[in-house]
Amino acid sequence: MTLLRSIFVAAAFGLAATLPTTAADISGAGATFPFPIYAKWADAYKKETGIGLNYQSIGSGGGIKQILARTVTFGASDMPLKAADLDKGGLIQFPTVLGGVVAVINVEGIKPGGIILDGPTLSRIFLGEVKTWNDAAIATLNPGLKLPAQSIVVVHRSDGSGTTAIFTNYLSKVSAEWKSKVGSNTAVEWPVGIGAKGNEGVANNVAQTRGSVGYVEYAYAKQNKLTFTSLVNREGKTVAPTAISFQASAANANWTGTPGFGVMLTNEAGATAWPISGATFILIHKQPKDAAAAGEALRFFAWAFAKGGAMAEALDYVPLPMNVVAAIQKVWAVEVKDAGGKPIFALSH
């Protein structure tokens, strides 16, 4: 059993921890999008420092609720909070890695990347308007591909999800009908389909359901050997999900000019850009209840920025540019303080 699979089993029983918890361990909760890389980082960090990460992979909505309730040291969300919400909660926000959301399907005879969809067609599938795999909208994009007259089963998230926020943000940009009827958020009123909890839940449902389509962070598609689709991007180019195409979507991102580094990376310009890309974010209190625990969390992410890039790339996440990392650590040093007003993180770390 792989490390990642064993963690998924733990999550199913409500544990969602990479290793047994000790008094010095770091607690966090939230997004399932980055769970594979946080698990990998946690395992390496535990071996190097003896400090573990107890991370609950419960979805972005749950992570936001838990950090606001101060029941964890940090929350995690794939949907960046707005400046007003950060101020109201007394929080800072920073990205950790970039990744891509992919449409995954279970259609016999089609290999990963072997079917092409565009934004309008994808939105019509999730609106319930394109009902079979041999629909003219799909067939036109895939001349010569043998498509079955099989009903499409839509699988979507049932929990509050940053992956959903990224996916529906994209659909809202490429479809006026989607924007007006459904919109974009961590949770929406889905017109059709069956719900599943977490990226892992959607991945499992798609794997088990013939004719299905869902959306997951790319690492889940890769780990579960799911068939992903290619997509037509904003420039009209057909692209596959890769670290290079995820990085291309962030090439012109204005990280430091956006409050809380809260950049959305959907439907970005660029011939090689993957159209459903995004960053994943950490939320931590400016004046944490437990300053020592907050310091441990920041040291963990500092270590990840310095030493975790290759691990991220192995799972097809994209490490942040070093100038963004420097800007993030400056925010830590200036804004995160203990009860006496002393900075918890020093730039010399």
Image: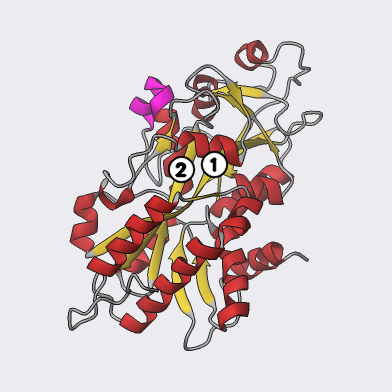
- x and y, in percent, of residue 171 in the image: 44, 29
* x and y percentages locating residue 66 in the rendered image: 36, 68
Residue for point 30% across, 47% down: 256
**Quarter of the image containing the N terminus?**
bottom right
The answer to whether 269 appears left or right of 333 in the picture is: right
Residue for point 72% across, 36% down = 106
**Residue 144 visible, this angle:** yes
Residue nearest the observer in this picture, 175 or 210: 175
Label 1 crowd (10 A; few <14 / some 14-19 / many >=20): many
- Asked if residue 191 is among those painted magenta in the image, a careful observer would answer no
Say whether residue 227 is left or right of residue 57. right
In the image: residue 136, left or right of residue 97: right
Residue holding disc 2: 278
Residue interval drawn in magenta: 173-182
Question: In this view of the protein, can residue 161 be seen by the observer?
Answer: no
Residue name at image x 49 percent, y 26 percent: 123
Disc 2 element = strand
Q: Answer above or below: position of 268 versus 11.
A: above
